[in-house]
Amino acid sequence: MNGMKDEMFDSSLISRFQKEIEPGYVLRPLQMNDHQNGYLDLLSQLTSVGDVDDEWFEKRFISMRDTNPKAYYVVVLADEKNDRIVASATLVIEWKFIHQAGCRGRVEDVVVDEQLRGKKIGSLLNRILVHLAQQIGVYKLSLECKDKLIPFYESFGYKKDEGNNFLVQRFDH
Amino acid sequence: MNGMKDEMFDSSLISRFQKEIEPGYVLRPLQMNDHQNGYLDLLSQLTSVGDVDDEWFEKRFISMRDTNPKAYYVVVLADEKNDRIVASATLVIEWKFIHQAGCRGRVEDVVVDEQLRGKKIGSLLNRILVHLAQQIGVYKLSLECKDKLIPFYESFGYKKDEGNNFLVQRFDH
């Protein structure tokens, strides 16, 4: 234990945003040990998480961390006093052959702890992901959202993709 | 040159579908040398491709092939006599912490050469991707499509995600 954090991506990519965080909270990449810091409890406010043990968590973390080129950017906000994760948003990069073998970005799994809503934390996380996506050089950034969140996301530059539909099918296991 | 094909994924995953292909065509994973076989020319019937040289193509191919766990499944149909790529569809897997650290699938970049449309090749490629996604165990499979293609995709089990919107922003480089 040498004090080094096992982080999903280089924290310097988002450090410029720390000054916008209120005292007592730290903005950082997801860490390998964040299973113990309640990351999945937070995600369970968003959707079903199910049982994921430490080993499975670490395996999933490593598969994301070790993508090359890097494809997963899980940004979290942690309570400084106990390292508890209180908000998170993920940027996923998809590598393409089209658009000059470019890449597109997707915003996924945005969640703010219900105790901390109304403090513009979701806005900050979204601005961070747009900034990251632009640095990486995506040609397109997209997300899915509930009807009531359209105005919120429009404020970050997103628009309905007119004439394009989003279709889904789900599978049980 | 030992005759081994450098394929993006294990061709046995899709070989059961070869019997549905008309004589003269081969169903297979994308190969490292498919830049020379017109893969990008085919994609240019779908959207902008731009200039991608052999080196850049191979680099992109390798980044997709070497994902671990495997995340890119580019399925192509090739003309047997000259190995020319005449159709393609891509399944991309996104690894998650939610849904029991599961995964979701996305259907991307489906294109059939305009000379070969009306032969149900697009349908076959879509059935193959749904089959692959089920084998991999995705909890959700999604795609974006033009209005006029909704009935086509509904025939494979996709539905509009009611109450969920798809928002996009684009960037110039």
Image (tube, coloured by chain):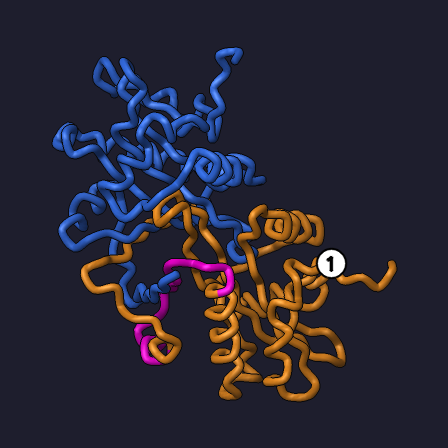
Chain colours: A blue, B orange
**In the rendered image, which quarter is residue A49 located in?**
top left
Question: In the picture shown, does residue B69 fall above or below A135?
Answer: below
Residue linked to disc 1 = B6
**Is B150 a magenta residue?**
yes
**Is B107 a magenta residue?**
no
Of A113 and B58, which appears nearest the observer? A113
Q: Where does the image place residue A124, in percent across and percent down from the top left?
A: 25, 30
Q: Chain of mark 1?
A: B
Three-letter amino acid code at disc 1?
A: Asp
Q: Secondary structure at mark 1?
A: loop
* Image point (18%, 43%), residue name: A152
Which segment did they paint magenta?
B135-152
Q: Is residue B77 left or right of residue B169?
A: right
* Image point (34%, 66%), residue name: A169
Q: Is residue A166 left or right of residue B65?
A: left
Q: Where does the image place residue A68, in percent across and percent down from the top left?
A: 58, 40
